[in-house]
Image (cartoon, rainbow, N blue to C red):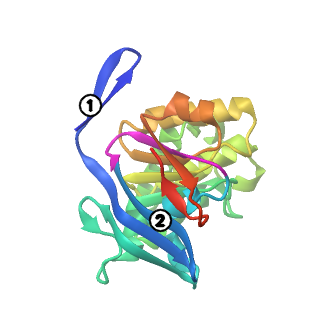
Amino acid sequence: MYTVKDHGHEVRFSDVKLKTEKLSLFYGKFRALNTISLEIYENAITALIGPSGCGKSSFLRVFNRMNDLIASARAEGRAELDGKDIYDRNADVVELRKMVGMVFQKPNPFPMSIFDNLAYGPRRHGRNNKAQLEEIVEKSLRRAALWDEVKDKLDQSGMALSGGQQQRLCIARVLAVEPEVILMDEPCSALDPIATLKIEDLMRELVKNYTIVIVTHNMQQAARVSDMTAFLLMDKDRSGTLVE
């Protein structure tokens, strides 16, 4: 049980969604993360803050095993989703990445139509019924607060949208495969203040149904949107450690 104050009211989080125990991450011989133990609660926004190079993004990528794509990377310790070891040898990485979606620092829509951007994930998971895909696309765009802006141009390229719209499109693309966790790696760093506010408002709406972990360099943003904040810092060996 974890209790925080929100505008004078107590908000309680009881279910741990993600957890690490003495987690270390290595790139070759370099230890990027040093024995980090942290609990991340369901339906809460947890912000990861700290100076550049302290391992925030590396820690974020632990939860959907994106670090596996780096040949020299290896993890020690334990990382869990719903109490199950993410790094178990029998873990299904494809299923893990369906459950734990990722939104990157710069918007990265696919070079295809808005509709196909949203339908790509469901199609990869075997959902090809046209009516079903249309329903998924509309539902995802509505959840990402983008439907009213693009409903009449679904056949146009996703890359023709503004930066803020592209980022919401990428969020909608993650939502289309029905994840339980959304990882966001500095999702507003390339956006103007108005687009940033829309993304922040969207996060506060999405957290009602999803668990969100966000990396941010913006202290004010962490204060505005997060329920809990984890502060990482480099130790004397330049490894990322959890300070508070």
Quadrant hosting residue 125: bottom left
Residue nearest the observer in this picture, 36 or 166 = 36
Q: Is residue 140 above or below residue 192?
A: below
The location of residue 153, given as percent across then percent down, is 68, 46
In the displayed structure, does residue 83 sit left or right of residue 176?
left
Q: Position of residue 44 (x, y in %)?
A: 38, 39
Residue under the point 60% across and 44% down = 216
Kind of residue sitting beneath label 1: Arg
Reading the image, the residue beneath label 1 is 12
Image quarter of residue 63: bottom left
Work out whether 242 lies above or below 238. Answer: above
Magenta stretch in the rendered image: 40-51
Task: Tell me what residue is drawn at x 50 percent, y 57 percent.
Answer: 241
Query: Which is nearer the N-term, disc 1 or disc 2?
Result: 1
In the picture, the disc for residue 84 is: none
Assign a secondary structure to mark 2: strand
Query: Looking at the picture, how far across and down is residue 70, in whole percent?
Result: 58, 79
In this picture, residue 170 sits left or right of residue 140 = right
Residue at point 33% right, 57% down?
19
Q: Which mark is residue 34?
A: 2
* Residue 219 lies within the magenta run: no
Pick the front one: 167 or 123: 167
Mark 2 surroundings: few (<14), some (14-19) or many (≥20) residues within 10 A = many
